[in-house]
Image (spheres, rainbow, N blue to C red):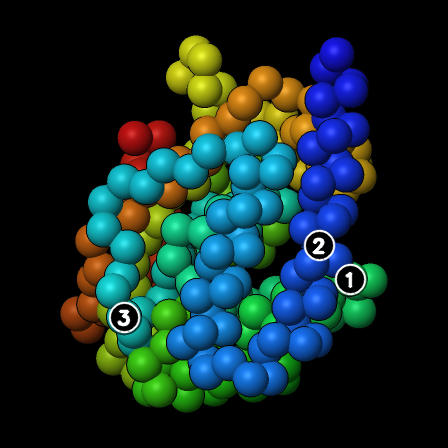
């Protein structure tokens, strides 16, 4: 029965992805940016439902930009979970842009791509983020730079925070956590780290009992004279507290 339910969830997910591609190709050109963002949020919330995942929001999500969300990173689910809680533009590694199906959806959702191995591209991205914040956008970054194991928070890279410092824009810390709906215990079934494959992580998630994704928004804060490295250390402590709460 467990595998039968997972297969049904997988079928719904696949159909939902193709529905998203149809919306992007056919409906998006006629929609305003606000309408597109609303569609991305609604599509992401529906995706969680198809995967058997409920959404719980704690704290207050930003009503508008400019703001940079800074979150821990644990799973392939983190992006749709945050999109479902509040539309935002993500910064992702450039490889994602070329992924079949997913790349097209990510690009349509406003993802900004960075070549992580290139210092020059990192500088370009900081400028792009600065300009986006000046336009009043809501951005989201995972300063760990990769997915962690969900037990310990990896050190934060401070480079992208420079955009918020130079734009004098607020940063809002966010803690992500997945729990078993029946017991309330922290769930690690959706992890995607090390040698784990994306397909294996997705299948393990679909086979699991119902999960609740908790998005805990902290209070927005300004740099207040701190440089990006000092600010990153403070945000690391704050996000670590939020993801446990």
Residue under label 3: 64
The residues tagged by marks 2 and 3 sit, at their Cα atoms, a distance apart of 27 Å
For disc 1, the marked residue is 101
Element class at badge 3: loop
- Closer to us: 116 or 25: 25
Residue contact between numbered discs 1 and 3, judged by CB atoms under 8 Å: no
In what quadrant of the picture does the C terminus appear?
top left
Of circles 2 and 1, the one toward us is 2
Q: In this view, does 201 lie above or below 23?
A: above
Marks 2, 3: nearer the viewer: 2
**Residue 161 in view here:** no
Local packing at callout 2 (Cα closer than 10 Å; few below 14, some 14-19, many 20+) is some
Q: Is residue 4 above or below residue 159?
A: above
Q: In this view, does 131 lie to the left or right of 191?
A: left
Mark 2 and mark 1 residues within 8 Å of each other at the beta carbon: yes
Q: Is residue 141 above or below residue 2?
A: below
Secondary structure of residue under mark 1: loop
Residue occupying image coordinates x 70% and y 76%: 25
């Amino acid at each position: 029965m467990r595998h039968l339910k997972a297969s049904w969830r997988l079928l719904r997910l696949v159909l939902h992805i193709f529905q998203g591609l149809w919306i992007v190709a056919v409906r998006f050109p006629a929609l305003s940016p606000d309408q597109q963002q609303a569609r991305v949020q609604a599509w992401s919330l529906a995706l969680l439902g198809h995967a058997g995942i409920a959404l719980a929001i704690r704290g207050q999500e930003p009503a508008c930009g400019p703001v940079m969300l800074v979150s821990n990173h644990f799973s392939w689910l983190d992006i749709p979970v945050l999109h479902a809680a509040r539309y935002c533009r993500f910064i992702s590694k450039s490889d994602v842009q070329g992924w079949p199906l997913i790349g097209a959806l990510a690009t349509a959702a406003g993802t900004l791509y960075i070549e992580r191995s290139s210092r020059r591209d990192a500088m370009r991205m900081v400028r792009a983020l600065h300009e986006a914040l000046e336009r009043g956008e809501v951005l989201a970054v995972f300063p760990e730079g990769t997915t962690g194991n969900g037990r310990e928070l990896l050190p934060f890279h401070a480079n992208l925070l420079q955009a918020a410092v130079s734009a004098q824009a607020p940063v809002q810390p966010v803690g992500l956590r997945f729990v078993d709906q029946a017991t309330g215990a922290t769930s690690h079934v959706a992890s995607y780290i090390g040698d784990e494959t994306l397909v294996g992580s997705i299948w393990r998630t679909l086979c699991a009992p119902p999960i609740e994704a908790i998005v805990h928004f902290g209070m927005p804060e300004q740099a207040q004279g701190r440089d990006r490295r000092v600010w990153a250390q403070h945000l690391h402590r704050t996000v670590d507290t939020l993801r446990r709460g």
